[in-house]
Image (spheres, grey):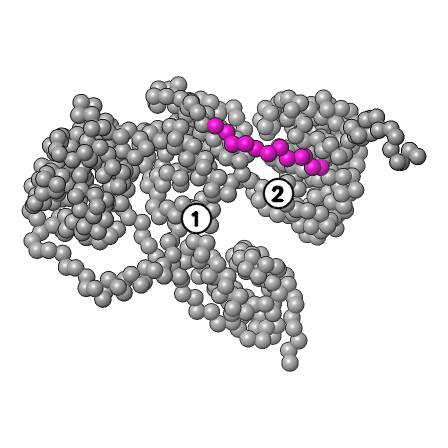
Amino acid sequence: MRPANTQNLKQFVVSVIPDSNRKNYLIALNHYARELGHEPTIDELTSVAIQGTLDRLDRLGRSRGTIKKVREVLLAIARRAFELKLLGTVPVVRWQPATPEREAAMPWTISELQMIFGSARTTPGDVAGIPAGRWWTALIATLLSTGTTVREVFEASQASFDPKTGEVPIGLFRHKLHPVAIDAVLSIVPHTSERLLPWPNDGGKPRDILLRRMKYLLFRANLPHVTSNLFERIRITASATPRILDRVNLSTPFTPRPGKPKLARARDRRRRKEELSTVVDLQLKKNSRATQATGELVRITFDGPENLRRFFDESYHPLRLADSPKASVEKYPGMLSRFGWFLACDPTFANLNDETAERWMAWMKKCGLSNATINGQRAMLLALWRHAWRKRKVAEPPRDVAKLKVSKVLPEAWSLEELGKIVNAARELRGDVAGIPAATFWPALILTLYDTGLRIDALMSAKLEAFDADSRWLKIPAKDQKQDADQVFRLSAETAAAVAAMGVDNEFLFPWPYDRNGGHGTLINHYRVILRAAGLKAEKRDLFHKLRRTSGTFVAKTLGRVAAQQHLGHSSPSVTARYVDPRMLDASHCDKLPRPTGTDSER
């Protein structure tokens, strides 16, 4: 009987796979480890576990290409281990996705819309006493003008419609209809119903009869009369091109298609219903908590002059953020992307109102984001909104978009004993970083962060000439600092010797061959390994910024809080107070309080 093989699977891959081909293998193993809940061994490479990993990725909404790649890589590792007689059998996995492919609906073209309007205006019969041709033309023109849903249009009242300005409240907003839509609505009002577009069937709500009539309208226009081409596609068209009615000719000659659409048999409808009951809505945004919370299936892209992303690139960025750090500038596109996923379309000036902003904040809260993160996103949106108001792009500035309450978390710093464990763990590392032994690079980096209290972005951007080994001075320019100010630090003799021992022959003082295009994900992952090797926590609040808090805490303990504020480059003492760990300070209020008399301990 073959003995159990408990060799770590990642170590096995590193030993048999060349460096140039190793990336995809390690990514697949990370997915496999998340499914098992721990680092897998060779014996744990089984068919059941691989199947579970693939199903998990499918539930998260990963693309089929990604899932197939993970399957191929895991089976390739298994075959290699089997060839080396480290695995008893090769797993067999025949994966079938639980979610079928679903294509996002595309907007209607101009010619297709003209065919739809032709079919609408020639529809026979009447709707609530209104000629059906006029009623359907008014409905479709209103939907294209407002970009709202049929349900919201059906709820609009006839009394609320202003024929002079064309304004009508639909849903949560007051819309100004396109001139084409105004003419279409005026052709049916006034009438006897209190609703602007009365629908007498289905209890006055958009249900089966309305959808069947819409399919019949598409059939007469010789267009595919399928479910994905109904009213939702009109809303998609309106969001993609808000002024599309400017280009549609409603008087285009039209000849309806003869006959009637073929209805599915009852047996086919039951079969389709059973199939749909087993289908999970496919999320288009991969591994996104925000998308999983909303279930949006489409996202509309619109690059017009009203686009907020375009306004940011052309106006706000060059005028307001010209001298801001790169990290601050890069947060705005992320904020606009998150706002766009909430709206299911690219945000425009029309989306800048208090109600939408507050709904967006509530949506982010539902997605699991912290209150502090949501407040940061709110601040960026309101800053962009105020700039648009000053440039007369919107009628009103933000008025009442309240912040969320943020709990005051006690700052935590490393003790000197814990800091020593981190440095010792770093000195035990193997391998190299850009030709420098890792056991030399990492202690120098950690000690420099402790001596200076610098942010990791600023230190990793420091050039080689910024450090003078003889005088032990390190100068960080203002362009790399969040506070936009130069700073100089005199390193300790131990830290200066550690930095000099690296023997750097590079543009940067700490040459890190990864993450140079933005972010420090790989650097943080390596630092987590050091923290775990030191037997310490490696959570989000235990990373490089905790070294900054540690440095500020011991400066405050030794020289006072004013010196700590200057050391950390803060604008006010209140900011520094969020960095100083009170547990590390000698002062204790209870030691200064007078003790009660007459207690049992005094007898």
Q: Is residue 486 covered in magenta? A: no
Please tell me how crowded label 2 is: few (under 14), some (14-19), or many (20+) other residues with Cα within 10 Å.
Answer: few
Q: Amino acid at mark 2?
A: Lys
Residue at x-position 52% and y-position 24%: 323
Judging depth in this view, the residue of 119 and 285 nearest the camera is 119
Marked residue nearer the N-terminal end (2 or 1): 1
Q: Describe residue 185's horizontal placement relative to residue 403 as left or right.
A: left
Residue 122 picture quarter: top left
Residue at x-position 23% and y-position 49%: 207
Q: Describe residue 291's horizontal placement relative to residue 260 as left or right.
A: right
Q: Amino acid at mark 1?
A: Gln
- Quadrant occupied by the N terminus: bottom right
Badge 1 marks a residue whose secondary structure is: helix
Q: Main secondary structure of the magenta part?
A: loop
Answer above or below: position of 353 versus 107.
above
How far across and down, in percent of the image, does residue 346 sit? 36, 37
How far across and down, in percent of the image, does residue 246 sit? 19, 32
Q: CA distance from mark 2 to mark 1?
A: 23 Å
Residue bounds of the magenta highlight: 402-413
Which residue is label 1 attached to?
292
Q: Is residue 2 visible?
A: yes
